[in-house]
Image (spheres, rainbow, N blue to C red):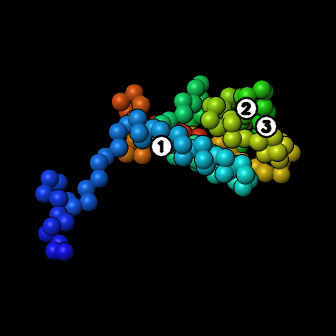
């Protein structure tokens, strides 16, 4: 069969695909997040990998009352779970001042009791960092800004 009979004259390219709509992208992002977070618990991913999973979502996770400055490492001194919430104690600019930060829900759901135990007894040391995430096809902008804020964990 000649190749020109396979050519669809109605489209510019022979194998042109349609661009997914926003609701389709949001549903696909939610399905992928649920699948990967279940895999993270099954395979016991490191905590910084789980935080990266939340940070790479299409929609942002509001950070709430976050007094942390961006790109500054705040060592986690203590972490505690209170029902569904996770509270993190970090020192502010002055080493004498302690700031208790309630983590957003998506981050809190991924922290296990074993990880809390390991951090509180200094078996694993992490620093909490507020990072800038540029908006593009993979991140929706919020409040008409070209960037959003995310949390990142770095091992000390």
Q: Across the whole image, how many numbered discs are drawn on residues?
A: 3
N-terminal of the pair, mark 2 or mark 1, is 1
Question: Disc 2, disc 3: CB below 8 Å?
Answer: no
Residue drawn at x 41%, y 39% as measured from the top left: 24
Do tag 2 and tag 1 residues touch (Cβ < 8 Å)? no
Residue topped by disc 1: 28
Q: Measure the alpha-carbon separation of dots 1 and 3.
A: 35 Å
Camera sees residue 76: yes
Residue 73: name its quadrant.
top right
Q: Is residue 132 visible?
A: no
Residue to which mark 2 is pinned? 86
List the residue tagged with mark 3: 78
- The image quadrant that residue 80 belongs to is top right
Q: Position of residue 85 (x, y in %)?
A: 72, 28
x 68%, y 28%: residue: 102
Name the residue nearer the viewer: 74 or 141.
141
The single residue placed furthest to the bottom in the displayed view is 1
First along the sequence among labels 2 and 3:
3
Q: Quadrant of the N terminus?
A: bottom left
Could you say whether the residue bearing mark 1 is in a helix, strand or loop?
A: helix
Q: Is residue 16 left or right of residue 43?
A: left
Q: CA distance from mark 2 to mark 1?
A: 27 Å
Residue 131 placed where, x, y %? Answer: 53, 43
């Amino acid at each position: 069969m000649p190749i020109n009979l396979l050519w669809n004259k109605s489209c510019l390219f022979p194998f042109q695909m349609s661009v997914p709509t926003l609701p389709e992208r949001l549903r696909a992002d939610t399905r992928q997040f649920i699948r990967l977070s279940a895999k993270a618990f099954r395979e016991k991913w490191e905590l910084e990998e789980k935080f990266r999973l939340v940070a790479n979502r299409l929609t942002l996770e509001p950070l709430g009352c976050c007094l942390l400055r961006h790109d500054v490492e705040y060592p986690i001194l203590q972490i505690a779970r209170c029902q569904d919430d996770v509270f993190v104690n970090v020192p502010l600019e002055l080493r004498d001042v302690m700031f208790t930060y309630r983590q957003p829900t998506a981050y809190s759901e991924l922290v296990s009791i074993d990880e809390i135990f390991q951090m509180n007894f200094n078996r694993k040391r992490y620093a909490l960092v507020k990072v800038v995430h540029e908006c593009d096809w993979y991140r929706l902008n919020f409040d008409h800004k070209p960037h959003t804020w995310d949390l990142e964990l770095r091992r000390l």
